């Protein structure tokens, strides 16, 4: 039976909480997370830091894959490739992620980050699946 991802469990994902990332959907190999752009997340040029967008894509991938793992499994990022298309200075961004392919030990995922209808970033990633015990 696949794991259930807790959408609003304080302390479940401390880094996500630090940057203000929250999940609104997370099931069946898909996730959606949102993040409000705040001044604390801007780079010296006063646009959203690329590392925040990367962290959002990475976290979205982990969440989407988590829903397809067995109770005794975890996952870890192997690699992520990301392209940035537009900058953002304020508002809310949304990351939609889906599992593209999953085998016993490796999974491939894709995240798209939007500001409204505008695609600001796209990422593909590979994750390793391993047993916990």
Image: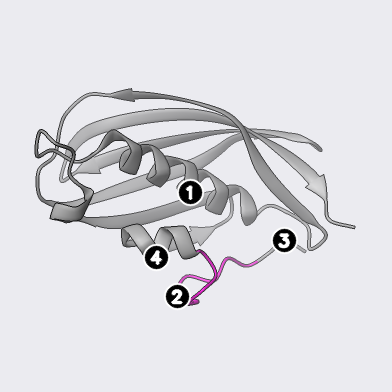
Instruction: Give the structural element (helix, strand or loop) at label 1.
Output: helix
Instruction: Give the structural element (helix, strand or loop) at label 2.
Output: loop
Mark 3–mark 4 Cα distance, whole angstroms, equals 24 Å
Residue depicted at x 24% and y 38%: 49
Mark 2–mark 1 Cα distance, whole angstroms, equals 15 Å
**Image position, residue 76 (x, y; %):** 66, 42
Q: Quadrant of residue 2?
A: bottom right
Mark 1–mark 3 Cα distance, whole angstroms, equals 18 Å
Report which residue position mark 2 lands on: 8
Residue mark closest to the camera, 1 vs 4: 4
Whether residues under marks 2 and 4 lie with C-beta atoms below 8 angstroms apart, the answer is no
Whether residues under marks 2 and 1 lie with C-beta atoms below 8 angstroms apart, the answer is no
In the image, residue 10 lies in the stretch drawn in magenta = yes
Mark 1–mark 4 Cα distance, whole angstroms, equals 11 Å
Mark 2–mark 4 Cα distance, whole angstroms, equals 10 Å
Q: Which mark is residue 17?
A: 4
Q: Point out the stretch of residues depicted in magenta.
A: 4-13
Whether residues under marks 3 and 4 lie with C-beta atoms below 8 angstroms apart, the answer is no
**Image position, residue 38 (x, y; %):** 16, 56
Q: Earlier in the sequence, mark 2 or mark 1?
A: 2
Residue found at the far right of this picture: 133
Report which residue position mark 1 lands on: 59
Which is nearer the eye, 81 or 38? 38
Report which residue position mark 3 lands on: 2
Instruction: Give the structural element (helix, strand or loop) at label 3.
Output: loop
């Amino acid at each position: 039976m696949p794991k259930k991802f807790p959408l609003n469990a304080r302390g479940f994902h401390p880094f996500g909480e630090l940057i203000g990332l929250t999940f609104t959907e997370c099931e069946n190999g898909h996730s959606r997370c949102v993040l409000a752009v705040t001044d604390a997340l801007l780079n010296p040029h006063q646009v959203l830091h690329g590392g925040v967008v990367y962290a959002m894509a990475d976290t979205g991938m982990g969440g989407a894959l988590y829903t397809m793992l067995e109770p005794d499994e975890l996952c870890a990022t192997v690699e992520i490739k990301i392209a940035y298309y537009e900058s953002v200075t304020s508002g809310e961004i949304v990351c939609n992620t889906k599992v593209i392919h999953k085998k016993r030990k490796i999974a491939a995922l894709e995240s798209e980050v939007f500001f409204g209808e505008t695609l600001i970033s796209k990422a593909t990633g590979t994750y390793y699946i391993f047993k916990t015990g």
